[in-house]
Amino acid sequence: MRDFRSLRVWQKAYEVALSIYKATLLFPQQETYGLVSQLRRSASSVPANVAEGCGCAGSREFARFSKIALRSASETEYHLLLARDLGYIEARTYETLSDQVPEVKRMLTGLIQKLNADG
């Protein structure tokens, strides 16, 4: 069993999730159960799946949860783009987050490759 808090990918994903929670505080109230909910859910799913994977006994199962985290990160990218195009998120915030999410995806891809090599 691994300590998820010690993983750089979890730390970065958690930082992104916190930033998204803060950014969505400014979204229109009518989006509370729409885009706000979807964006928060997908963003928080990334570090949550990494944490869950750390609780697995083997590398194969950890890799499976990391792949789920990677899919959630892709979903987060889409929701951020939609929020930007709807004018719900400031350009500066979007630029920061749109740089951070692909970084998390690269880190997850590296983790998955390492876990698959460990077998």
Image: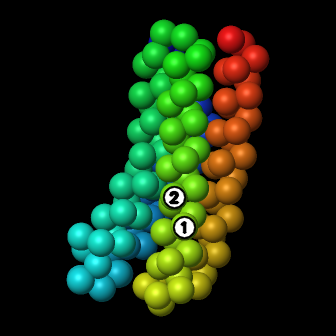
Q: Residue at x 47, y 63 (%)?
A: 19
Number of other residues with Cα within 10 Å of mark 1, as a class: few under 14, some 14 to 19, many 20 or more? some
**Residue 100: x, y in percent?**
64, 59
Q: Does any portion of residue 3 appear in the rendered image?
A: no
Q: Residue at x 70, y 20 (%)?
A: 116
**Residue 109: x, y in percent?**
70, 38
Q: Quadrant of residue 110?
A: top right
Q: Residue at x 30, y 72 (%)?
A: 34
Q: Residue at x 64, y 75 (%)?
A: 95
Secondary structure under badge 2?
helix
Q: Is residue 102 left or right of residue 31?
A: right
Q: Nearer the viewer, residue 92 or 56?
A: 56
**Residue 31: x, y in percent?**
29, 78
Q: Is residue 40 above or below residue 29?
A: above
Kindly identify which residue carries mark 2: 75
Amino acid, disc 2: Glu
Q: Nearer the viewer, residue 14 or 48?
A: 48
Q: How is the image coloured?
A: rainbow
Q: Quadrant of residue 91?
A: bottom right
Q: Is residue 55 above or below residue 6?
A: above
Amino acid, disc 1: Tyr
Q: Is residue 44 left or right of residue 68?
A: left
Task: Give me the C-alpha separation between circle 2 and circle 1.
Answer: 5 Å
Kindly identify which residue carries mark 1: 78
Q: Does any portion of residue 34 appear in the rendered image?
A: yes
Q: Quadrant of residue 38?
A: bottom left
Question: Does the CB distance between marks 2 and 1 fall below 8 Å?
Answer: yes
Number of other residues with Cα within 10 Å of mark 2, as a class: few under 14, some 14 to 19, many 20 or more? some
Quadrant location of the C terminus in the rendered image: top right
**Residue 79: x, y in percent?**
48, 69
